[in-house]
Image (cartoon, rainbow, N blue to C red):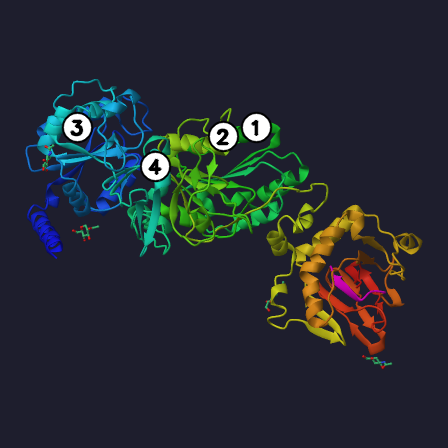
């Protein structure tokens, strides 16, 4: 009883004492050294502003002497500037927080910081490190700590002005000397440590240095806010410093500063960098779209159709198109696009394979075209394999008002995307904690990332300042995109990716055959979504929902299946192959007597289209047959597939016959009227004809026994149908 009363009394006393002496927030000033306003500095400053810290920046405009400007200003120059600054400060009650800025973010505000400082019960508190540097030999001189890190980190400290003045008074070093060593020597000197009254924040209650501690820090999400938590000491540090080789990790944590970036909820007004450019609607910046064709790629025609639909005034767009592919068909597609639509754009520059440029060289050139063009406000990089479905993409990206920003695109059904969440120590891919959530859209926002590719917008001003080096993509070690991102990071420029809208996807360019006239027809396995969009009738997906299936004759179903382009490509592919056969030669291809009436035809297997056609039957026809003929299931595994040509002077019609199949598919590949006259199909048993077949629509009817039928004469022009006998 007595004991607990005593404890209670003690607690009350210390509470009262704490209240009495609470350090006033007005006395706190944050001091940092920044010779340049890098994106990292801006991030620091925004986070400080968010929490209402008062910040004093030293060294602005000063040339930074120690090391390259991509790392934080360090060394003696920092101490010199700080010493000069504190000598001018006269308010002895002032409390100084010194932090780095290029790789620091605040996770909480002044009151929590001051409370924790007070609880440390010392006049100066330094951040702590688990690793000792730069002089390992000093290890034994460091006092032991009860729990936590034993070594001092000079990147962050807080203290009362008089004590900090005392600590800096002895500085006489050079600008290139180590500040870390200077402060360490003070700390390990027992006399100085005591007189200045220095301690370390060993348990990371105030400062978290990420160097050597990445695994100890996790992000903790609560009520749409986030804190970094040190799980080793169970603390919530206030200042997060991405020092050492972990520098990049701070980008990742920086994504989660409360209200700095939008996440989970997705909002556009969260901070100044996300403020839309309202002027956009009246005054469109000039954008150079740089299109790179680096390998044979499917659906190039569709790419250009989408490009034309991009919502942006074409007279504010210039095109730079680099085509590295020698196969003739890309050149044909390109030149017909330029011929038909090039004049809509302010300018079109085409560079072909004859220039023999490699990937890096072509990208260096494309970037330089914008750099050298003083009218160029933005460069929009767009690789040919990108399927940009969102027509507003360019406007959305410009409105983000960021240095470099990519729309997130993914590969259908995969975790692949055009950004990396993190980097490995060697600078290669590493998966960040939140990567999957971002790719799958469970976290939505604008994210600072270390790598992006395929499609992104660059502010042209950067190309004339930080990124003015011509050879941004050139490297003897890294592939061009990695070299580029390495250089961008090296200049302290931030790259962002947004998943606040759906933008599109990327095609697979693997297994792309280029031996056909219409190679895209063969893409049903590799790029099924794009294949469907291109080749399946736009109303196919509605036929069940909206009951679009017609029944022109008993048990004969009629519905849209192939797009106009699909029909045309199949016909053109067959005519391109050209080996039409009929009569006696047909017998050679008869399997098990299925085809008992000879037609003028080409079989799908003659153009190596058998596997693809079977996949088409399985994906798009089997579900319909199973619906219309309940209880019947098909694997479409032994079908006979061919395209038939009817011509008045060749073979105009087909005499009545059974199709020795379980069911038959009969797709009209062209249109009565413009393409031919006559034609159609008559089912004799029912005295019922389907005349005026519709292009892209198919008939689906039972084969043997009931649906004895004939092909009605084509009286003019040429008629094409695609036929499949499916059995079973
Ligand atoms: C910062 O100050 C403003 C105005 O004084 C206040 O509205 C806001 O809540 C403060 N922000 C924080 C994070 O305390
Ligand atoms: C450091 O200062 C605190 C008061 O802030 C005091 O209680 C403590 O005794 C001092 N420590 C040393 C070693 O002087
Ligand atoms: C699809 O259906 C809509 C409305 O039913 C029609 O307007 C449109 O022409 C159809 N598309 C094609 C390609 O026939
Ligand atoms: C078949 O139908 C046509 C009209 O659709 C009709 O003129 C003819 O008499 C019918 N034939 C038989 C055998 O029912």
Q: Secondary structure at mark 2?
A: helix
Residue at which label 1 appears = 357
**Mark 3 touching mark 1, by CB under 8 A?**
no
Residue 36 included in the magenta stretch of the image? no
- Name the residue located 61 percent from the left edge and 64 percent from the top edge: 541
Residue designated by label 2 = 365
Secondary structure state at the residue bearing disc 3? helix
Which residue, given by chain and number where applicable, does mark 3 sit on? Answer: 82
Per the rendered image, the range of residues in magenta is 660-669
Q: Mark 3 vs mark 4: which is more N-terminal?
A: 3
Q: Which residue is mark 4?
A: 213
For disc 1, the neighbor class at 10 Å (few under 14, some 14 to 19, many from 20) is some
Judged by its main secondary structure, the magenta piece is: strand
Residue 372 on image: x %, y % = 42, 30
Quadrant assignment, res 641: bottom right
3 or 4: mark nearer the eye: 4
Q: Is residue 668 magenta?
A: yes
């Amino acid at each position: 009883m007595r004991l607990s009363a005593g404890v209670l009394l003690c607690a009350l006393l210390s509470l009262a004492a704490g209240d009495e002496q609470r350090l006033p927030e007005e006395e706190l000033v944050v001091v940092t050294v920044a010779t340049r306003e890098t994106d990292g500095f801006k991030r620091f400053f925004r986070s400080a502003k968010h929490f209402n810290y008062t910040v004093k920046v030293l060294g602005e405009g000063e040339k930074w002497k120690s090391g390259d400007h991509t790392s934080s200003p360090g060394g003696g120059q920092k101490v010199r500037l700080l010493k000069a600054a504190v000598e001018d400060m006269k308010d002895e009650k002032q409390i100084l927080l010194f932090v780095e800025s290029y790789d620091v973010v605040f996770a909480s505000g002044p009151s929590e910081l001051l409370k924790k400082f007070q609880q440390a019960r010392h006049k100066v508190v330094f951040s702590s490190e688990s690793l000792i540097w730069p002089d390992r030999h000093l290890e034994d001189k460091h006092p032991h700590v009860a729990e936590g890190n034993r070594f001092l980190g000079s990147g962050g400290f807080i203290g009362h002005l008089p004590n900090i003045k005392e600590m800096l008074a002895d500085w006489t070093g050079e600008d290139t000397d180590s500040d870390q060593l200077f402060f360490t020597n003070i700390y390990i000197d027992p006399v100085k440590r005591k007189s200045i009254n220095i301690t370390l924040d060993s348990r990371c209650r105030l400062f978290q240095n990420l160097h050597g501690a990445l695994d100890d820090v996790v992000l903790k999400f609560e009520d749409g806010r986030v804190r970094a938590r040190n799980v080793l000491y169970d603390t919530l540090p206030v200042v997060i410093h991405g020092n050492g080789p972990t520098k990049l990790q701070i980008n990742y944590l920086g994504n989660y500063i409360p209200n700095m970036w939008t996440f989970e909820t997705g909002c556009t007004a969260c901070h100044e960098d996300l403020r839309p450019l309202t002027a956009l609607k009246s005054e469109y910046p000039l954008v150079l779209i740089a299109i790179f064709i680096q390998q044979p790629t499917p659906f190039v025609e569709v790419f250009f159709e989408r490009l034309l639909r991009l919502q942006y005034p074409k007279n504010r767009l210039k095109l730079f198109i680099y085509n590295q592919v020698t196969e003739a068909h890309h050149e044909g597609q390109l030149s017909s696009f330029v011929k038909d639509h090039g004049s809509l754009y302010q300018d079109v520059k085409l560079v072909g394979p004859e220039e023999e440029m490699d990937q890096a060289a072509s990208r260096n050139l494309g970037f330089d075209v914008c750099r050298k063009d003083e009218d160029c406000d933005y460069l929009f990089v767009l690789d040919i394999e990108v399927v940009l479905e969102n027509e507003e993409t360019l406007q959305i990206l410009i409105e983000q008002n960021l240095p470099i920003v990519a729309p997130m695109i993914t590969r259908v059904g995969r975790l692949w995307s055009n950004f990396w969440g993190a980097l490995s120590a060697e600078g290669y891919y590493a998966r960040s904690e939140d990567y999957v959530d971002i790719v799958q859209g469970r976290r939505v926002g604008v994210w600072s990332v270390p790598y992006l590719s395929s499609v992104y917008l660059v502010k042209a001003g950067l190309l004339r300042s930080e990124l003015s080096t011509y050879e941004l993509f050139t490297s003897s070690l890294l592939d061009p995109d990695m070299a580029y991102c390495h250089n961008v990071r090296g200049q302290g420029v931030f790259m962002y990716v947004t998943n606040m809208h759906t933008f599109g996807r990327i095609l697979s360019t693997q297994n792309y055959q280029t031996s056909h006239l219409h190679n895209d027809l063969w893409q049903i396995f590799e790029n099924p979504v794009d294949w469907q969009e291109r080749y399946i009738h736009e109303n196919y997906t509605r036929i069940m929902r909206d009951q679009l299936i017609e029944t022109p004759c008993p048990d004969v179903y009629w519905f849209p299946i192939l797009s106009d382009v699909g029909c045309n490509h199949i016909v053109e592919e067959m005519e391109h192959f050209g080996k039409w056969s009929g009569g006696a030669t047909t017998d050679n291809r008869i399997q098990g007597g299925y085809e008992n009436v000879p037609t003028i035809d080409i079989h799908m297997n003659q153009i190596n289209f058998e596997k693809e056609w079977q996949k088409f039957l399985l994906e798009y026809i089997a579900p319909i047959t199973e619906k219309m003929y309940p209880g019947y299931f098909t694997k479409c595994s032994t079908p006979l597939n061919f395209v038939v040509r009817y011509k008045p002077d060749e073979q105009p019609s087909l005499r009545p016959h059974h199709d020795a199949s379980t069911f038959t598919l009969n797709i009209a590949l062209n249109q009565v009227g413009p393409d031919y006259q006559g034609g159609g199909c008559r089912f004799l048993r029912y005295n019922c004809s389907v005349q005026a077949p519709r292009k892209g629509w198919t008939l689906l009817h039972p084969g043997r026994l009931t649906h004895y039928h004939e092909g009605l004469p084509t009286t003019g022009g040429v008629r094409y149908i695609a036929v499949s006998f499916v059995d079973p």
